[in-house]
Image: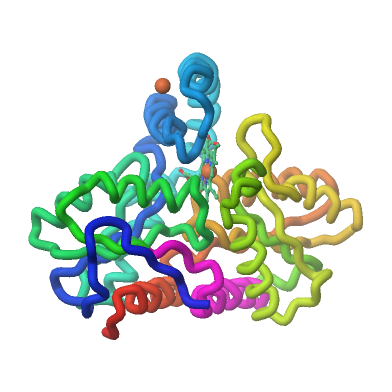
Amino acid sequence: MPASASAASSPAQATPAAASTALVLVNLGTPDAPTPRAVRRYLAEFLHDYRVVDRSRWLWCPLLHFVILPLRSGPVARKYASVWLPGTDGGSPLAVHTRRLAEAVQHELPQLRVVHAMRYGRPALAATLQALRDDGIEQALVLPLYPQYSTSTTAAVADALARVPGLPTRMVDDYHDDPAWVAAVADSIRAHRAEHGTGEHLLLSFHGLPQRFADRGDPYPTHCEAGARAIAQALGLADDAWTLSYQSRFGRERWLEPSTLATLDALAARGLRPVDVVAPGFAVDCLETLEEVAIGLAEHFAARGGSLRYIPCLNDAPAHAQALAAIARCALGAVA
Ligand SMILES: C=CC1=C(C)c2cc3[nH]c(cc4nc(cc5[nH]c(cc1n2)c(C)c5CCC(=O)O)C(CCC(=O)O)=C4C)c(C)c3C=C
Ligand SMILES: [Fe+2]
Ligand SMILES: [Fe+2]
C-alpha cells in the first residue's frame, strides 16, 4: 500500500508541486549538547507532551520535575556523549543524519524547498513553518520521519501543525508498507549481509510503546508487524529466520512485547549466533539505535556468548531519499 496522507490544517488542494511548495521532514528532536542541562531541557519538553505521557499532571509533573529529570539527565547525557558525532558539522546523530537526509531529498526534488524540523528541540517545527510562510511559501507537505503511525509521535506532529495558522499543510500519516521504503530497507539488509556475512537470525527491533496505547486503538504495532513481514518477504526469509521485537522501554507499565532484550536472551539460549539486528522504525540512527542497540545490547549479547551485528538505519542513503521523494510526490499529487 502507498503511504497515507491527511489534510493537517487549513484546506490544501492536491495541487501540482511548485516552487512555492515546501517539504518539511520532521523528526522527534534531540538535545543540543551532550550535557545534563541540555538533556534536561529536551526531556522536559518531550515528556511534558500529553501525547507521550498521558498521565494526570497532578501526579506526572512532580514525578517528572523532582525525580525523573534530576535522576535521568546526567546518565542520559553520558549516553549521548558516547555517540556524539565530532567536528564542526557534528552533533547528535539524530540531528546530523536528519539534516543530511533533508539535503539528499532536496537533491531528488529540486522543484520543492526541502527543509527539516524537530517536534521537540531545534529547529522547532512551529518556527520552521512560520519562516517558510514569511518567505512566501504557499503550502507545505509535512512528512514525519516515522514510518509507522503512532498517536505518541505522528499525532504529536499534527498537534503542532494545528497551532501554526496561515500556511496550508498536508501531512503524510505513515509509510509503513510503502513499496519503495520496504525495498530500501530490504536492500540495506541484503547489502550489509553481503559485506559482513549472513547472521543465523534477523531481529527487526522497533521502538516500544505502552501496551495501553495499543489497547485503545493506536495502529503502531499493526504497522510494525505489517512492515516487518513485508521486509522479511522482500528478503525471501522463512518465518523462523526473523523476529520482531520492541526496544527502548520507559517507565514501569507494560510495553509492547516481545522486548528486544528478552528476545536476544532467547536467541542466545537457542545458540543462534551471530544475530543481525535492524531497526526499521528509525529513519535515522540516534541514541536508541547506536547506544542502546549497537553498543548496549551488543555487549549484553556478547556476555551470553553471541555476536550481534547491527545494520545501520537508512540515514541519507540515496535509496532512502528516493523513497521519501516518491512518497512526497505521491502525496502532492504531482510528478517531478
Ligand atoms: C513514555 C515515553 C515514551 C514513548 C511513548 C515513546 C515513543 C516513541 N519514541 C520514538 C522514537 C524515539 N524516542 C527516542 C528517545 C526517547 N524516547 C523516550 C520515551 C518515549 N518514547 C525517551 C525518554 C527518550 C530519550 C532518551 C532517554 O531518556 O532514554 C528517540 C531518540 C532521540 C535521540 O535524541 O536520539 C527516538 C528516535 C518512537 C518512534 C515512539 C513511538 C512509537
Ligand atoms: Fe510540569
Ligand atoms: Fe521514544
Quarter, ligand 2: top left
Magenta span main SS: helix
Q: Residue at x 77, y 48 (%)?
A: 301
Q: Tell me if I can see residue 222 in this picture.
A: yes
Q: Tell me if I can see residue 302 in this picture.
A: no
Residue 19 at x, y = what percent?
A: 14, 73
Q: Residue at x 32, y 58 (%)?
A: 8
Considering every residue shown, the one lying at the far bottom of the view is 335
Q: How is the image coloured?
A: rainbow
Residue 327 at x, y = what percent?
A: 40, 74
Residue 174 at x, y = what percent?
A: 47, 64
Quadrant (top left/top right/bottom left/bottom right) for the C terminus:
bottom left
Q: Is residue 111 above or below residue 172?
A: below
Count the labels in the image: 0
Direction from residue 298 to residue 209 in the image, left or right:
left
In the rendered image, residue 223 lying in the magenta stretch gets the answer: no
Residue 307's image quarter? bottom right
In-front residue for pair 138/258: 138
Q: Residue at x 29, y 60 (%)?
A: 24
In the rendered image, residue 180 lying in the magenta stretch gets the answer: yes
Residue 188 at x, y = what percent?
A: 57, 73
Q: Residue at x 22, y 77 (%)?
A: 15
Considering every residue shown, the one lying at the far right of the view is 270
Stretch in magenta: 172-194
Direction from residue 320 to residue 242 in the image, left or right:
right
